[in-house]
Image (spheres, helix red, strand yellow):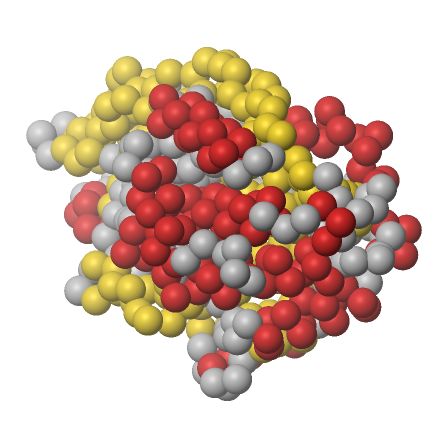
Amino acid sequence: MEHMPSAAEMLGWIETVVGQGIRRPGYPADAWTEQWLAERLSGFGLEVSLEPVEVRRWQPGTGLLRLDDGTSWTGLPLPFTAPARSLRGRIARLADARPGDIVVDELTFTELPQSFVRTLATSAYDPEGSFDTLVQTIPFGPRMMEVVEPALAAGAAGFVGALTGLPWDTRDYYVPYDAIERPIPGLWLSGTDARRLLARLPCEGELIAESTLDTVTTHNVVATLPGASPHTVIVASHHDAPWASAVEDASGLALVLATARHWARVPARERPHNLTFLLTSGHMAHAAGTRAFIDRHRPELANVVLQLHLEHAALRCEAVDGKLVPTTDPEVRWWFTTRAPQLEKLVATTLEAEDLRRSFVLPPDVFSPMPPTDGAFFHPEGVPLVHFLSAPMYLFDSADTIDKVDVAGLEPLARAAVRIVAGTAGWTPAELRVAP
Ligand SMILES: [Zn+2]
C-alpha cells in the first residue's frame, strides 16, 4: 500500500485538528475543522460537499457549589442540563434526599473483564493472551448517559455528580451527550472535592451551573470517489468532540483521511465500489450528523455494501497517584460487525494480517440495541457495517491529549480499513444484509 500516509503524517493531521481548541458541536474549532477536512479531501482529488446539520449548541459557563460555611468548589456543568444562576437549598446524598434538595450522587466507572467479553465475541485476535486477565475500565457508570435520572426520580431541584469512583482526579466528564435537555441544573465535581463535600452532608448551600443553549447549522463533510460497481462503501468518523480531543475523534479523522488518500491514488477500476467518505457533525449531540445523513440519503442506503466507521486509535492508560499515564499497549479494540459470515471472516483475517492485537469481533447489538458508535443509527436501517471503536476511560475528558494516541496503531489501522474495503470486491448489499 504505497499510497498510505505514514504515522507521522497522520499524527500531524491529528495535531493540527487538536490545535484548534475545543470542537464541541457548533464551536468555532469544529467549524474550522469542517473546512479543513473539505480542503484536504478535495486536495486528494475527491468530490466534496458540505451537507448542513442543525445541532443544539450547548456552552457551559460558571460551575460552582458554595456551602453556607463559605467552602466552595468549581465544577463542570453537566451537558444539556438546565442553567441556574443560583439555586439555594439543602444539599444531601441521594439516599437521604427530600424533594426539592440538591442531590449528590457518586459515579463509579464500570470494570469490564475481557474474559467475559470473550464469551460474547464472534472471534478475538489476542496473540499475547491478554484477555485472560485484562480488565478494562470503560468511560461510563452502570447507567451510561442516565446519570441524572435517579435524582430526578427523587424530586431533586439540582444534581451534583461526585466523580469519586474514577481512577484519576477530574471534573471534566462530558456526559451525558444525548442532547436530552434535563430539567434541573447539574454539576460534576472531582473525586477529591466531592469527598470533602460528602463529609459535610447534609448541609445548606448554593449551586451555580451556568450555560447557554441555541441551535446552529454545522456540516457533514461528504466526499466521493467513483468505483467499479454500482454499489457504495461508506467510510466514516466524526469531526466534533467533547474537548480539544486527540483520540476522540481526531484519530478517527486521520484514519478516514488516510483511507481516502489511498483510494484516491488508485485507478477507479481498482476501487471495488463507489466510495463515500463521511465525516459527521454532532456526535456529541446524539449523533446528529449520522441521523441527518441517513434522513437525507435513505433511498440510497439499499445500495450500500458496507458502512465502515473508524473511531479511536487509543493507548490504554493506567492511573498513577491520581493521574493518567499512557502505557505502550492499545486500548481493547472492538470491531462491531454485522453477522454476515463472509464479513466476519474478512474482519478476522484483516486483524491477523495487520497484527491488530487486543481486538474483538463483536455482534453490533452485543452491548445495546445499537453499537455504541457514532454510526449506530445505520444499524437499525439494516446497512451492513463494521464499526471499529475503542473506549478508553479518558474518552470524554480533557485528558484526551496527543500523548494518548496509539501512534503505532495508526498505519495498521488505516491499512486494515483499506483491506476491509478491498475485501468487499464483488459483494452485493443483498448478500450481506441480515435482519436487524
Ligand atoms: Zn468517536
Q: Residue furthest left?
A: 70
Find residue 82 and report its image quarter. top left
Up-down: is 177 above or below 269? above
Residue situated in front as seen by the camera: 408 or 203: 408
Percent position of residue 153, x then y: 52, 35
Percent position of residue 88, x then y: 27, 21
Residue drawn at (39%, 25%) of the image: 32
Q: Residue furthest right?
A: 430
Residue drawn at (37%, 45%) of the image: 14
Percent position of residue 99, x then y: 43, 29
Residue 157 visible to an observer of this rendering: no
- On the picture, is 245 further left or further right than 120? left
- On the picture, is 394 further left or further right than 269? left
Up-down: is 356 above or below 398? below
Quarter of the image where the N terminus is located: bottom right
Residue drawn at (24%, 23%) of the image: 62
Percent position of residue 324, x then y: 25, 60
Residue situated in front as seen by the camera: 124 or 94: 124
Residue drawn at (50%, 29%) of the image: 38
Residue 328 visible to an observer of this rendering: yes
Residue situated in front as seen by the camera: 215 or 352: 352
- On the picture, is 195 further left or further right than 254? left
